[in-house]
Amino acid sequence: MAKIVGTILVFVIAVLETSVAAAGFRSPESLVRNVYAHYGDHSSDLSSGLAHDTATARQFFDPSLQGGWISLKKTPYDFLVQSTTWKLGAISISILRKQFDKTYVAVAFDNNGRAVALNFIVVNGPDGWVIADVESPHDSLRMFLSQHRN
């Protein structure tokens, strides 16, 4: 009987860990770090930019952005690096402010010799931190997705 209870407990813990890992992150900083972990040298799928599939959208984005992220196929550039190509330098991440249910995270990095600064607006959902929007000096991810919806 104890063996069966132990097996059930291990199964329940595994299911809970899988559901938490499927959507959201534990902190605003870890969310942003994980976004840019996808922008490597194209040597693997995990370094070819943030994928536009259902699993990625669910893990990284608020439900209101998920559909737009998934439908994005042809765009003039990748909004999260502000370019069609990337070779990112060190990434600076800092919390600008916490306001009610949103946290504003400033991100700065060098992309191919050009300085890029973005503000991530993140919310703490039921499964962890996800992106509600990203602002550039000229646009927002939400507006970008609506303009380039396929």
Image (cartoon, rainbow, N blue to C red):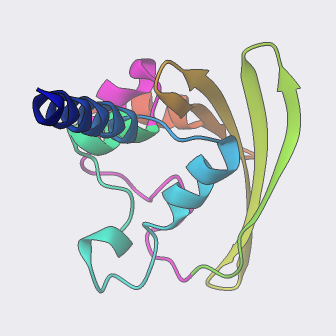
Q: Could you tell me residue 48's position as x and y percent?
A: 33, 71
Which residues fall within the magenta stretch? 61-87
Whether residue 5 sits left or right of residue 90 in the image: it is left
Please tell me whether residue 25 belongs to the stretch shown in magenta. no
Q: Is residue 2 left or right of residue 74?
A: left
Q: Quadrant of the C terminus?
A: top left
| Residue at far top of view | 100
Counting the numbered discs, the total is: 0
Above-or-below relation of 11 to 47: above
Judging depth in this view, the residue of 41 and 27 nearest the camera is: 27
Residue 120 lies, in percent from the top left, at 68, 41
Q: Label the magenta part by its dominant secondary structure.
A: loop
Question: Can you say whether 111 is above or below 61 in the image?
Answer: below
Q: Image quarter for residue 141?
A: top right
- Image-based side of 113 in relation to 5, left or right: right
| Residue positioned 32% across, 30% down in the render | 16
Residue located 35% across and 52% down the image: 75
In the picture, measured across the screen, residue 45 lies left or right of residue 69, that is left
> Is residue 148 in sight in this rendering?
no
Quarter of the picture holding the N terminus = top left
Q: Is residue 62 magenta?
A: yes
Quarter of the image for residue 70 reads top left
Q: Where residue 11 sits: x, y (%)?
A: 19, 35
The residue nearer to you, when weighing 134 against 26, is 26
Which residue is rendered at x = 60% and y = 79% of the image? 88
Q: Which residue: 24% across, 33% down?
A: 15
Q: Report the front residue among 120 and 16.
A: 16
The residue lying furthest to the right in this view is: 97
